[in-house]
Amino acid sequence: MESTKPRLFSGMKPTGRLHFGNYFGALKQFVDLQDTHDSFIFIANLHALTGLPAKDKLMQDTHDLILDYLGAGLDPEKVTLFKQSDVLAHANLTWVFNNLVTVPYLMRAHAFKDAEAKKAEVNVGTFDYPVLMASDILLYNTDVVPVGKDQKQHVEYARDIAGKFNNQYGELFKLPKELILEEVEVIPGTDGQKMSKSYGNIIPLFGTDEEITKAVMGITTDSRGKDEEKNPDELVIYQIHKLFNGSEELKAQYTKGLGYGDAKKMLIKDIIDFVTPMRARRDYFAANPKLVQQILVEGAMKANDIAMKKIFDVYEAIGLTQ
Ligand code: ADP
Ligand code: TRP
């Protein structure tokens, strides 16, 4: 039976270990919303191809990401989990949409502009990334797309593209909305910039105790002593610490009386306590690869059911079926 809950669609690229920016900026929302939404969460492995990963790395990262999803608390009884490459319609719909968008429109995308600023020659996959992402979202009659703030423009593109198609060929696509939790818009990394694997400033979500300790010890602090009064909201360490302990008491300690060395020790303990149950779930699934395989196969079947119907309706609407 069709669910009456709003449809949620999102996912991440398998491009390396997740960090707490990914968790608090995106993954936590997937977990929090799984009871109230009819959720589809996928592994965007076709999107990962833009970086031309080596075969073994892509396979390893894909395997890690599904374990990270499950470890973080996505429940396969509630959420449809699948790999993008298991649903061929994503690429088919991208080709249809490619004809509705113009080159200047795609050149305005932030991600393309960033890539172009870094590299003289950007590949076509990177250029077309927003169109593939629009296809992901629109294939599933999606209502909401929980993402970090940097992905907002991509969801706007999906909405634009749905509108263009609907105008030209009739109303086939729902207009999706991004879902961004204001209070966790951008999680800072250990140096105070946005936490990102490209900046080397991450705290790994499933790191070992040693890795977590090393990252926390590297958090930027200033030279003020513990009895000098401070505004905690301006301290990188507090901005990170409050994610794990939002109490007024902790904030008061940061204002006055807590030295940075002791604060780091507390933070390390709070992070480890926080991830301990998630590690146990991740280890359970890591020890049961057949179960993980089965989750992905069932997810792909369910996703294909919906996506095949949609691509067939699209082909019919544009004159590709007789
Ligand atoms: P990275 O910047 O490390 O390469 P990705 O671009 O792969 O991370 O991001 C995956 C998801 O996590 C996206 O939805 C993104 O918005 C979110 N995200 C990543 N870093 C942060 C951050 N520092 N704060 C909030 N959300 C983030
Ligand atoms: N672009 C997203 C990221 O970098 C990943 C992604 C691909 C995605 N397709 C999506 C997210 C569809 C939400 C919906 O994190």
Image (tube, rainbow, N blue to C red):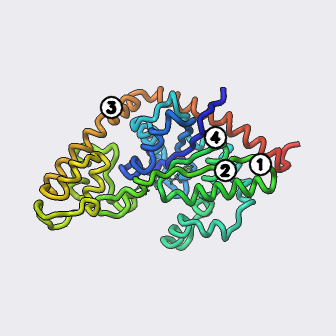
Which SS class for mark 4? loop
Rate crowding at label 2 as few (under 14), some (14 to 19) or many (20 or more) other CA atoms within 10 Å: many
Q: Residue, x 20% and y 63% (percent of image)?
A: 230
Tell which circle, 1 or 4, labels the residue nearer the N-terminal end. 4
Image position, residue 140 (x, y; %)? 65, 42
Please report the residue visible at 66 percent of the width from the left and 71 percent of the height from the top: 104
CA gap between label 1 and label 4 equals: 23 Å
What residue is rendered at 31% in x and 63% in y? 192
For residue 87, the mark is 4
Distance Cα–Cα, label 4 vs label 2: 21 Å
| SS of the residue under disc 2 | loop
Decide if ligand 2 comes within 8 Å of the CB at mark 2.
no
Q: Amino acid at mark 1?
A: Glu
Along the polypeptide, which appears first: circle 3 or circle 4? 4
In the image, residue 305 lies at what x, y percent?
68, 33
Tell me the quarter of the picture where residue 124 sits.
Answer: bottom right
Read off the residue under disc 2.
175
At label 4, which amino acid type do we have? Answer: Val
The circle on residue 171 is 1
Dot 4 or dot 2: first in sequence order is: 4
Which quadrant: the N terminus?
top right
| CA–CA distance in space, label 3 to label 2 | 38 Å
